[in-house]
Amino acid sequence: MDYTYYPGCSLEVSNKAYDISARNVVKALGANLVELEDWNCCGATNYMSVRELRSFAISARNLALAEKQNRDVVTACSACFTTLNKTHSYMEGNAKLRGEVNDALSAVDLKYDCKIKVRHLLDVLVNDIGIENIASKTKVKLEGLRVVPYYGCQLTRPNATFDDAEFPTTMDALFKALGAEVVDYPLKTKCCGGMLMTTAEKVALKLVKNLLDCAVKRQAHCIVTPCPLCHFNLDAYQDNVNKMFGTNFAVPTLFFTQLIGVALGLSGQDIALGQEIVPAGGVLSSYMGGRQ
Amino acid sequence: MAEMQLPAGKLAELSERFLQDVYSIPDGEKIKLCLQCGTCSASCPTSYAMDYTPREIIAAFRAGMLDRVLKSNTVWMCASCYSCTVRCPAGIKLTDVMYELKRLGIEYGLYAKQATAPVLSREFVKMVDKHGRNPELSLLGTFYLKTNPFGLLKMAPLGLKLFKRGRLAFRPSKVKKQYELARITKRLESKEGK
């Protein structure tokens, strides 16, 4: 099955590992991500902080382009997912907004009729491809690997489309089916600070410290996440957390697609292993059999 | 906080504008139903660092103190995690209210001097308008130069690690049909200003 794929700015460069592993995992599972031609930035939290209507309009350009393909649009970035889906649901439920945005889109002969769905890749993997199906295709059981399923905020909030807003369980079920020991993690939807890491670093570092602390206390070997922003804050800023709090965390953080890739027997290159700052090769070595 | 307050006329205009803008958000009128229970503040991961908690924002607005809220650090501490929104028993989309306050603060120039998030947001909009995508590296570079040049030095070790891993792009990726975005946003200028 083909899906229209919206990578988003973050997956293009700084979080390429997510893009690479997502495409290869989906391919290995017999589906196909077809990149949306000439997509633009979804607007993220920042555009919305300056201009509301314009933010919806530039976000909707992507939706209008995707609707022409007549397929659901799938993104792996939780922040893009929330922004695109918020645009979709507000336009769907509010005729005035729909009219205003479509009036703006008509300047370039585009129109969005809200006929497609915005979906997160986790939703597609779990609900279309199916957990049992994925498990049946695995080459390596993730036995003994203690995994923290960290969902973050944007995946299920404000609109919980496929999992619970506060207590999601799809990744828990997925990695359990792949043989991992899924850690019961009470902070699974607590915020990592998002963009505050740039504008209020001390506040965000404290949130990340809480997340890492809880993971370590529960003897996690690694954290998996479906969000590039969560990944960046947990992984790239772990050193700063250690400096600020005098801790010595070294918790590998993986994109959930990378760990699925390990179970599917993909190579380290296929899942872009090694791009993370806190090395994950060590905890994965016994599952990769030299495929790093 | 003993900072200067807006003249009464200007404050009334600001408050009215805030209400009308919030009402235009889907479900925006629910703000009238706030019962001051504090679920939002208790759910907020960053309320501990805010001058006014999310609950207090609505209380302050009702007390005619919206300008003080805007000049505090509160709205720029909102990480947009939507915990308050999904938990509010009155169905108030408080994250959307926060966005509205961010926009008003930027428009009226009412925000805490030390708040750097408005700078990031404005630069972000400029760059997305120009490239159609977020050129992460130049955005962060510009942001640090404008707010805290020393921050660039502090970021250098991480930057180097990212560079070694091929995670920095020195030439920003661009949308091919940038003119489409320009036309779309131009069409909205009359409604939203520049």
Image (cartoon, coloured by chain):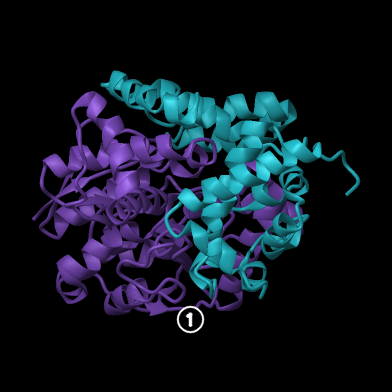
Residue at x 20% of width, y 37% of height: A111
Place residue A224 in its image quadrant.
Answer: bottom left
Specify whether residue A66 is in view: yes
Could you say whether the residue bearing mark 1 is in a helix, strand or loop?
loop
Image height of A149 relative to B191, above or below: below
Image height of A288 relative to A87, above or below: below
Residue at x 50% of width, y 23% of height: B194
Residue at x 73% of width, y 30% of height: B148
Q: Which residue is mark 1?
A: A184
Which chain: cyan? Answer: B
Give the amino acid at mark 1.
Answer: Asp
Rendering colour (chain A)? purple
Specify whether residue A248 is in view: no
Q: Residue B50 location in percent, x, y?
A: 74, 56
Outermost residue, front direction? Answer: B9
Image height of B24 relative to B156, above or below: below
Q: Nearer the viewer, residue A123 or B104?
A: B104
Q: Residue B42 location in percent, x, y?
A: 66, 72
* Mark 1, other Cα within 10 Å: few <14 / some 14–19 / many ≥20: some
Outermost residue, top direction? Answer: B179
Place residue B17 in its image quadrant.
Answer: top right
Q: Is residue A117 left or right of residue A224?
A: left
Outermost residue, right direction? Answer: B2
Q: Residue A173 location in percent, x, y?
A: 32, 78
Q: Nearer the viewer, residue A118 or B96?
A: B96
